[in-house]
Image (cartoon, rainbow, N blue to C red):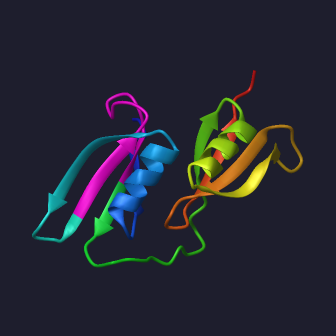
Amino acid sequence: MRLLHTMLRVGDLQRSIDFYTRILGMKVLRQSENTEYKYTLAFVGYGPESENSVLELTYNWGVEKYEMGTAYGHIALEVENAAEACERIRQAGGKVTREAGPVKGGTTVIAFVEDPDGYKVELIEKHA
């Protein structure tokens, strides 16, 4: 078994694609539309689906906003330098919600950013 993807419902597909590609550096791997059930899917990631886990961005036509609920946590990405990643994201128009620094009670350096729909993305600095 292997993890294939995580699905996120988004309120504006192009806005979300822009965030994950332009700001976080992913690529659109494939996109499809289902006219009968009125939704569009876009799969984004850092490499081919055959070798990497990816995100499935689901846009249900006409739905602009979702309630986050209390069960969802975050997506985590490994970065070389969390502070530099925060600065790049901020400069590109992204929202940093927690600046880079050690995790409470530990030494791992993390930061958090937020996507346009409010989903949290944790940046975890790569260990040497």
Corner quadrant of residue 119 = bottom right
- Split into 4 quadrants, where in the image is the C terminus? top right
In this view, the residue farthest toward the front is: 91
In this view, the residue farthest toward the top is: 128
Percent position of residue 30, x then y: 25, 43
Q: Is residue 32 left or right of residue 44?
A: left
Q: Nearer the viewer, residue 84 or 30?
A: 84
Residue 86 position (above or below residue 62): above
Q: Is residue 41 magenta?
A: yes
Please provide the residue range marked out in magenta: 40-56
- Split into 4 quadrants, where in the image is the N terminus? top left
Percent position of residue 27, x then y: 37, 39
Percent position of residue 93, x then y: 57, 55
Residue at left 77%, top 51%?
99
Q: Is residue 105 left or right of residue 123?
A: right
| Residue 4 seen by the camera | no
Residue 21 position (above or below residue 73): above
Q: Is residue 122 magenta?
A: no
Percent position of residue 12, x then y: 36, 67
| Residue 74 seen by the camera | yes
Residue at left 68%, top 53%?
112
Residue at left 41%, top 58%?
16
| Number of numbered discs visible in the structure rendering | 0
Q: Is residue 34 left or right of residue 98?
A: left
In this view, the residue farthest toward the right is: 105
Q: Nearer the viewer, residue 23 or 105?
A: 23
Residue at left 15%, top 63%?
34
